[in-house]
Image (cartoon, rainbow, N blue to C red):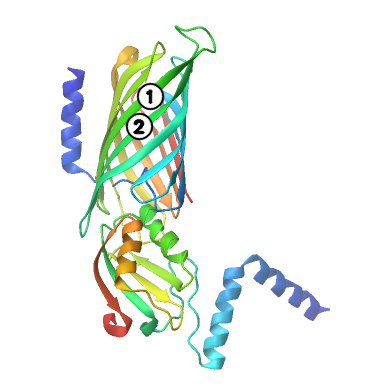
Amino acid sequence: MKISITAILFMTFFFVFPSLAQHGEHEHNHNHEGQVAEPSAASNDTGNAACEDTINIKVSGLVCDFCARSLEKVFLKRGDVGGIKVDLGKGSIVVAMKPGLTIDDATITKLIADSGYNVSAIHRGCEHG
Amino acid sequence: MKLTVFTLCCVILMGYAPQSLSRPVSYPGGWTVMQKNDKNAHSLHVHYSPTAKYSIGYRTEYWRGEEWQFHGAQLNYLVKRHNAATSQANFYLKGGLGIAYGDLGVPDGEAQPAAFADIALDWETRRYFTSYENRVYYAEDIAKFFRQKARVGIAPYIGDYGDIHTWLMLQVDHITGERDNISFTPFVRFFKNEYLAEVGISDKGGILFNLIIRF
């Protein structure tokens, strides 16, 4: 009986909070299969993406949280982007690509411009630490 | 005299201030809802941005004192945006075309063509905000006037991305016509994620309440 109740509670919990369920799945993949988990598409989250699958973009004009939401909207519409993290303090964003996928610099520049900003620099992979 | 005082205030405010959170142009495919209220009027503007340069949408306004309302289409155009390392500045042109209904001076329920034109400037950093906007209204026998407003603001703390952000702001409003006056409205702006709200009260006792949601 207790097991049934616990199972129902768990199912309800993961149904109501799918993002948490997704997070749990990431941890499972990472811990038990030794694979790099696919980054979450949740806002301001690059998940557990390995650094080689990330792009660090220095963005000018990045001063407003409310306006910077456009970066998430624009990048997360793409199927090849797993997650995005905005850092207003550094004036940069980190884009986590899905494993094996990438975006060329010209497309990044256009996406940033569509979001209302300008690109100052693009660093790929682990070079930005 | 009032115009001189207002202009002086604007110059001072523009000199000190910085940030435009209520961008009238969003990202391609983005929708924005703006609902604003002050002692003069209530307005609703819903716009869609096909590109990052312009947006189109529906606007309605109700002016309480004169009891007239506007319904029409509005075009917002980003003329120039300057992105610097720690600041952003914008220059917009806006225009609206539609119809106005008024209860005073014209037969009840009679619609008349109406239009407005608008210039908006802003500059912002993470700490400071300043903006200036003016608008000319024309609605045949119902209303003809000029309105301008300037805003300055300061963030008492610098929040990270995703935090609740708070701004302490002051709006100076000048309107011509029968209402001819200058008002000062201190208000607080809050925003988190895609939601922004402003609450304040003017020196004339009018309540300011604005809400902006971006999709």
Is residue B47 depicted above or below B29 in this figure?
A: above
Q: Position of residue A125 (x, y in %)?
A: 33, 82
Figure quadrant of the C terminus of chain A: bottom left
Q: Is residue A100 left or right of residue A116?
A: right
Can see residue B118?
yes
Q: Earlier in the sequence, mark 1 or mark 2?
A: 2
Q: Position of A56 compared to B82: left or right?
A: right
Q: Is residue B173 visible?
A: no
Residue for badge 1: B115
Chain identifier of the residue bearing label 2 in the image? B
Closest to the observer, B61 or B48: B48
Residue at image mark 2 = B95
Q: Residues within 10 Å of mark 2 (few under 14, many from 20)?
A: some
Q: How many marks?
A: 2
Judge from the rendering whether residue A76 lies leftward or rightward of residue B148; answer left or right.
Answer: right
Q: Give the crowd class for mark 1: few <14, some 14-19, many >=20 residues within 10 Å.
A: many
* Residue A89 in the image: above or below residue B198: below
Name the element at disc 1.
strand
| Residue positioned 61% across, 69% down in the render | A18
Q: Position of residue A128 (x, y in %)?
A: 27, 80
Quadrant of the rendered structure where residue B187 is?
top left
Q: Do circles 1 and 2 both sit on a common chain?
A: yes
